Amino acid sequence: MRGNLQDKASVIIHRGLIHLAIHPSTPPMVLAWLSRTKDTCVLERLAENPRTPAGVLIKLSSHPEAAVKSAVGCNPKCLVWLICKLAQDEDVDVRYSIAENPHVPTEVLSILSTDENPYISARAFRTLKRLSQAHPVHMIRVSPQVRFRGINSN
């Protein structure tokens, strides 16, 4: 009976942490505190929250789990240089998630369209095609200081 009660308490705490991580009104200080957890489900939700501080997103971009890194790349407040870093990640799932994100700068998508993995390159090409059909003048410029795979992405 005691073990069952502890299990229920753990589930309730876990759900509460996830709720804090996704809630749009959770203060950035609390989100930063949540980043100390080892729970990847909580970290993934935290990485998606637009109120998560940039420093936390930078930390989460180096997490060993692809789902956490992918969530960082999907965050609308993700810094361009961090998106470039994630687009070069060794994990194909992370690069794929960047390739399917329509909010990624078109220069990054163009580079991903030449990725050695055919699924990533095809996905990036489809995202670019969809963007060009929806917004013919859709061009987000990447700063000339940003380097991508050793090539100036200007």
Image: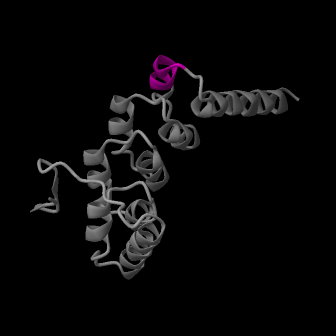
> Is 14 in the magenta?
no
Q: Quadrant of residue 112?
A: bottom left
Image location of residue 101, percent across then percent down? 45, 59
Image location of residue 119, percent across then percent down? 42, 78
Residue 86 seen by the camera: yes
Along the horizontal axis of the image, is 4 left or right of 84? right
**Is residue 57 depicted above or below 89 in this figure?**
above
Location of the C terminus by quadrant is: bottom left
> In front: 145, or 137?
137
> Is 32 in the magenta?
yes
Image location of residue 86, percent across then percent down? 32, 54
> In front: 84, or 15?
84
Q: Residue lying at the far right in this picture: please name it.
A: 1
Q: Residue lying at the far bottom in this picture: please name it.
A: 118
Which range is magenta?
27-33
Along the horizontal axis of the image, is 92 left or right of 88? right
Location of the N terminus by quadrant is: top right
**Is residue 114 depicted above or below 137 in this figure?**
below
| Residue at x-position 46% and y-position 44% | 75
**Is residue 104 depicted above or below 36 in this figure?**
below
Q: Residue lying at the far front in this picture: please name it.
A: 137
Image location of residue 153, percent across then percent down? 16, 60
| Residue at x-position 66% and y-position 31% | 19
Q: Quadrant of residue 72?
A: top left
Question: What is the basis of the colouring in this image?
Answer: one colour
Residue 89 seen by the camera: no
